[in-house]
Image (spheres, helix red, strand yellow):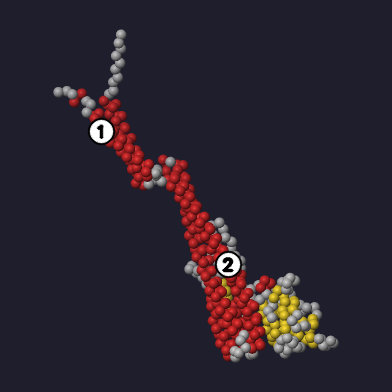
């Protein structure tokens, strides 16, 4: 016995399925077309919440890195300008030093030395102006931890006295930044306990002796008081007739540093308060040496200008030249050290910049992976969907012709 099986598909059902298939393909084709146009995997974050969150985090990191890069660029520009300014200051000091050496020439007359002093004054003004240089935003390049717009001020009431109008110190670099200013106090100001920059002058020189530069004792016994000054007075021992000296600290006022008068020997160092000074020649009773701490490069330059310009003889000029050279060399060393720090900071900024560039590249890669569409894959999928959509339309058109009425008549 044979059983025949029949299946039946209604025209309406076939029509509904065809329309649904066409609509589905049209939606897919439209979505792919939108991705190709925008370059994004999903136009709506709700379509892929995880990918949207990853992309947002990457964009935030990129924005932060770009902000740090801009700040680092400004900081590096400021330090670069500071390094260049220090170079100009060193060049001016070296020119100052050469003129000071020339002033020691025994053939120069007092008028010649006054001419040299005028040239030295111009160089002093140049160095002082450089110390108050600002960056493009008007911030002092040597403002340390914070200062007035002009960090260095000359006290009009006391010529040759300069102060640092700010908070001394050097800010530290971080993982993303470097300081935008250098410590001007360390670069231009002297510290007696470190530099031993003192100016020695005679208020009386009956014996016409000469002195060397003041130096720190080795090893140091004590540290001289900041802004301190001393006086050495020579006198004859009434009992033995030997020449003696006594050291007194005049600023701040204090009792004699030496507990008693000490016998003087030419060429033997005179030591006091952690300092050492050598006097050569014949000292006579009444000779008086004044020892004043130089508190800044500018003050040392001022003192050199005054002493050289007012030197009445080659011997006095030679004394002034020796004192000036010692202080100027200390100043050059300080500026060179500050310039070396600026170079280190510039190298540090390059390292930070390289790390920021690498971080930005990684963040951009993460954002692209989470957000950007693969164009090659998307174009291929679009072409496939377009072909399928065309085939669906053609199939639907053929199905529409499968009607009984097409065969009647």
Let me know if residue 101 appears in the view.
yes
Q: Where residue 367 appears, x then y in whole percent?
A: 45, 48
Q: For mark 1, does the 10 Å Cα neighbourhood hold few (<14), some (14 to 19), or many (20 or more) residues? A: few
- In percent of the image, x 28 and y 34: which residue is there? 391
Q: Name the side, left or right, on which 357 lies relative to 3.
A: right
- In percent of the image, x 28 and y 36: which residue is there? 390
- CB under 8 Å between discs 2 and 1: no
Q: Looking at the image, which is closer to me, 403 or 280?
A: 280
Residue marked by disc 1: 394
Secondary structure under badge 1?
Answer: helix
- 166 up-or-down from 11: above or below: below
Residue 340: give its label: 2
- 319 up-or-down from 372: above or below: below
Outermost residue toward the right in this view: 239
Residue 407 sits in quarter: top left
Q: Where residue 27 appears, x then y in whole percent?
A: 33, 38
- In percent of the image, x 67 and y 78: which residue is there? 198
């Amino acid at each position: 016995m044979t059983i025949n099986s029949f299946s039946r598909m209604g025209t309406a059902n076939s029509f509904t399925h065809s329309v649904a298939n066409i609509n589905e393909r049209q939606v897919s084709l439209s979505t792919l077309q939108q991705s190709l146009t925008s370059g994004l995997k999903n136009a709506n974050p709700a379509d892929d919440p995880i990918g949207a969150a990853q992309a947002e985090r990457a964009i935030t990191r990129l924005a932060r890195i770009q902000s740090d890069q801009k700040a680092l660029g400004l900081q590096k520009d400021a330090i670069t300008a500071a390094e260049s300014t220090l170079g100009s200051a060193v060049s001016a000091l070296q020119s100052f030093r050469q003129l000071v050496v020339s002033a020691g020439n025994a053939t120069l007359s007092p008028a010649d030395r006054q001419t040299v002093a005028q040239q030295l004054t111009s160089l002093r003004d140049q160095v002082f102006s450089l110390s108050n240089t600002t960056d493009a935003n008007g911030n002092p390049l040597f403002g340390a931890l914070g200062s007035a717009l002009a960090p260095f001020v000359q006290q009009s009431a006391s010529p040759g006295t300069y102060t640092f109008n700010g908070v001394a110190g050097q800010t530290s670099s971080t993982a993303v930044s470097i300081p935008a200013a250098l410590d001007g106090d360390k670069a231009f100001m002297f510290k007696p306990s470190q530099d031993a920059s003192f100016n020695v002058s005679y208020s009386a020189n009956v014996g016409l002796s000469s002195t060397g530069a003041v130096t720190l004792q080795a090893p140091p016994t004590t540290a001289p008081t900041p802004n301190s000054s001393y006086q050495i007075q020579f006198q004859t021992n009434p009992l033995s007739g030997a020449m003696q000296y006594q050291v007194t600290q005049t600023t701040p006022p204090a009792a004699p540093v030496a507990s008693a008068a000490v016998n003087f020997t030419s060429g033997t160092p005179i030591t006091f308060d952690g300092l050492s000074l050598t006097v050569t020649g014949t000292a006579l009773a009444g000779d008086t040496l004044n020892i004043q701490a130089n508190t800044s490069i500018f003050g040392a330059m001022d003192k050199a200008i005054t002493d050289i310009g007012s030197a009445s003889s080659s011997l006095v000029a030679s004394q002034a030249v020796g004192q000036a050279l010692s202080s100027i060399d200390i100043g050059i060393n300080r500026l060179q050290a500050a310039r070396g720090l600026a170079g280190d900071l510039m190298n540090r900024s390059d390292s930070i910049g390289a790390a920021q560039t690498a971080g930005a590249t990684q963040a951009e890669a993460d954002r692209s992976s989470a957000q950007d569409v693969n164009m090659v894959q998307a174009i291929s999928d679009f072409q496939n969907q377009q072909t399928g959509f065309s085939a669906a339309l053609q199939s639907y058109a053929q199905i529409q012709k499968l009607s009984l009425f097409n065969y009647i008549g």
